[in-house]
Image (cartoon, helix red, strand yellow):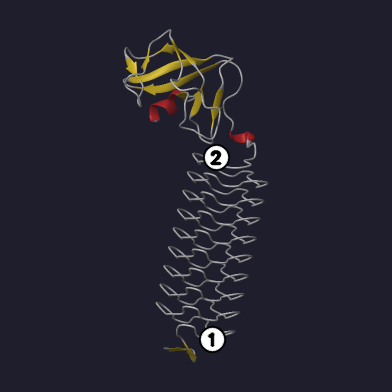
Amino acid sequence: MKVNGYTIKEGANLHDADLRNANLQGADLQGADLRSANLWNANLQGADLRNADLWNANLQDADLRNADLRNANLRNANLQDANLRSANLRVANLRNANLRNANLRVADLQDANLQDADLRNADLRNADLRNANLRVADLQDANLRNADLRNANLQGADLRGANLRVANLWNANLQDADLQDADLRNANLRSAKNVPSLPWTIIVPEGELIVYKKVMGGIAKLKIPADAKRVNATGRKCRASYAIVLECPMGAQSLHDNTFYYHAGCEVRPREPFCEDRWDECSSGIHFFLTREEAEQY
């Protein structure tokens, strides 16, 4: 197959090739040498680029949807505004790559090296970033909603303004990461390492609290005594070590354990020891919300 005068095949030598606007949809470029190639606005949808060397290549505005880039070398590559939706980038080397504004939605980036990569404003919704190296990566204002970041290395990453709602950060390394103004609502930070204090996410102050809980049959009104331990993760659901039931429907049961009852005037404590790990949102404790409206909507 010839494109722009170049032979397109597995293992092809396309070093410095000018393939701007080229239609390479579905092309077999396994192991090809595409170092410093100009692939601006190229159509590489569904292309096989496994083990290809794309060091310093220009892929700005390229269409790489569903492309197979496993083990590809994309170090220093320009992928600004590229469409990598559903692309397979497992174990790819994207160190120092420019992925600003790139569409990486649902992309597979397991074990990928994204150290020092520019991912500002990138769309990484539902992306698989398990075990990825994002050390010192720039993720300002990136959309990582529902992304899987288990075991990812985010040491020193810039996550200012990033959307991490519902993201899974289990066992991720967040040492020196900047999470200022990041949206961490309902993110999973269980077992995450070196998590910053994130004081703006703490919503359960000291002192006595009047709170609300959804139970079978309606809403229970609880008092959290001043000496009760209380935590919340990144969302609005909170837990306490014990509570006093002020009001509740007759014979109210827990939504999750129909043998656990709430009776007005009684003290309630979790059956298991209270878990003080604030990131373990669904762990042991008396769960509650600060407002009746939130409890009703739960």
Q: Which mark is residue 13?
A: 1
Residue 82, placed above or below residue 222: below
In the picture provided, is 139 more to the left or to the right than 292?
right
User: Percent from the top left, x then y, of residue 249?
Assistant: 34, 14
Q: Nearer the viewer, mark 2 or mark 1?
A: 2
- Amino acid marked by disc 1: Asn
Compute the Cα span from label 2 to label 1. Answer: 46 Å
Q: Residue at x 57, y 25 (%)?
A: 204
Secondary element under disc 1, as helix, strand or loop, is loop
Q: Which residue is mark 2?
A: 191
Q: Please state the total of marks drawn on the protein image.
A: 2
Q: Nearer the viewer, residue 83 or 267?
A: 267
Which quarter of the figure is the C terminus placed in?
top left
User: Percent from the top left, x then y, of residue 240?
Assistant: 51, 22
User: Percent from the top left, x then y, of residue 276?
Assistant: 55, 27
Residue 225, placed above or below residue 52: above
Q: Nearer the viewer, residue 295 or 274?
A: 274
Residue 206 falls in which quadrant of the image?
Answer: top right
- Amino acid marked by disc 2: Ser
The single residue placed furthest to the front in the displayed view is: 272
